[in-house]
Amino acid sequence: MDKQAVRTDRAPAPFQGAPYSQGIVAGDLVFVSGQLGVDPEAGQVVDGGIVEQTQQAMKNLSAILEEAGSGLDKVLMTSIFLIDLDDFQPMNEVYASHLSEPYPARATVEIAALPSGCRVEIAVVAGR
């Protein structure tokens, strides 16, 4: 199967030069690496808390999907990583504001830590 890397300046580059792509297109699917609440221009976590970080992560996801010829309306599966499940409700409200029914399949898990003090990371698989 052929695969093609997706790269846009409208989303953060791979964290500290790590060996992964922002996204991969394979056939009619787009796989987007986990996105943090990092502003791609500043290269830093956005000010605020879970709401602002989720908003920025969704913006980053959207930029990568658009570069791949897709969009948030074509997301099939979402994986969400939170450092505190108490952030679930505010994260969920922001997340829901970017998507529409039928909502994607989803997994949400609590983890010990994320880079740079981030509170949320979101990865998606979408159609094209």
Image: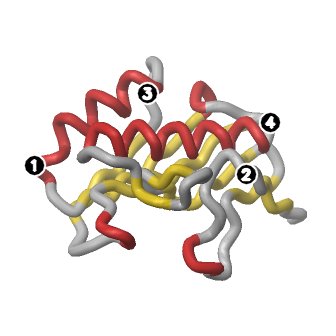
Pointer 3 or 2: first along the chain: 2
Look at the numbered disc 3 and give the secondary structure of its residue: loop
Look at the numbered disc 4 and give the secondary structure of its residue: loop
Q: Return the residue found at the far left.
A: 86
The quadrant the C terminus occupies is top right
Residue 9 circle label? 2
Q: Position of residue 61 (x, y in %)?
A: 57, 44
Q: Nearer the viewer, mark 3 or mark 2?
A: 2
**Is residue 15 depicted above or below 3 in this figure?**
below
Residue 103 circle label? 3
Tell whether label 4 touches label 2 (CB within 8 Å). no
Instruction: Report which residue position mark 1 lands on.
Output: 86
Looking at the rendered structure, the number of numbered marks drawn on it comes to 4
Tell whether label 3 touches label 1 (CB within 8 Å). no
Rate crowding at label 3 as few (under 14), some (14 to 19) or many (20 or more) other CA atoms within 10 Å. some
Q: Nearer the viewer, mark 3 or mark 4?
A: 4
Residue at 54% over, 60% down: 43
**Is residue 102 depicted above or below 85 in this figure?**
above
